[in-house]
Image (spheres, rainbow, N blue to C red):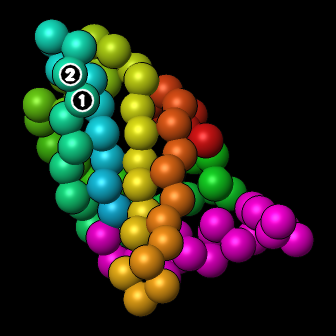
Amino acid sequence: MMKNPQETIGNLIDRQGVSFISSVDENGYPNTKAMLAPVKREGIKTFYWHTNAPSMRIKQYRNNPKACIYFYDKRFFRGVMLKGTNGSIG
């Protein structure tokens, strides 16, 4: 068991240069995309990335706010998956 899960998870996230974000398409299937690390995070519940407003991902989040993000530490073969809704993942 982790002594401080929020700190441990935050440290793992901050050391990664790549993140994976997932949205749900119009047929209910998951869509995952590799992205650069978030430009900002607030704890482990709110994350911000840069993207184009007319992007497919934005359209999918507007139609279905369910979201998932994943950060992977290849050095130790471990990762963290956070699920929630667009604007509030945790």
Q: Residue 13 location, x and y as percent?
A: 52, 70
Q: Which residue is located at x 49 percent, y 72 percent?
A: 78
Placement of 65 over or under 83, stated as above or below: above
Q: Which residue is mark 2?
A: 29
Confirm whether the magenta stretch covers residue 10: yes
Amino acid carrying label 2: it is Tyr
Q: Which residues are magenta?
A: 1-18
Relative side of 58 to 10, left or right? left
Placement of 79 over or under 42, stated as above or below: below
Q: Image quarter for residue 9?
A: bottom right
Label disc, if present, on residue 87 of the rendered structure = none
Q: Which residue is mark 1?
A: 30
Relative side of 14 to 68, left or right? right
Amino acid carrying label 1: it is Pro
> Callout 2: 10 Å neighbours few (<14), some, many (20+)?
few
Q: Residue 56 location, x and y as percent?
A: 11, 31
Placement of 36 over or under 16, stated as above or below: above
Relative side of 25 to 70, left or right? left
Q: Split into 4 quadrants, where in the image is the N terminus? A: bottom right
> Callout 1: 10 Å neighbours few (<14), some, many (20+)?
some
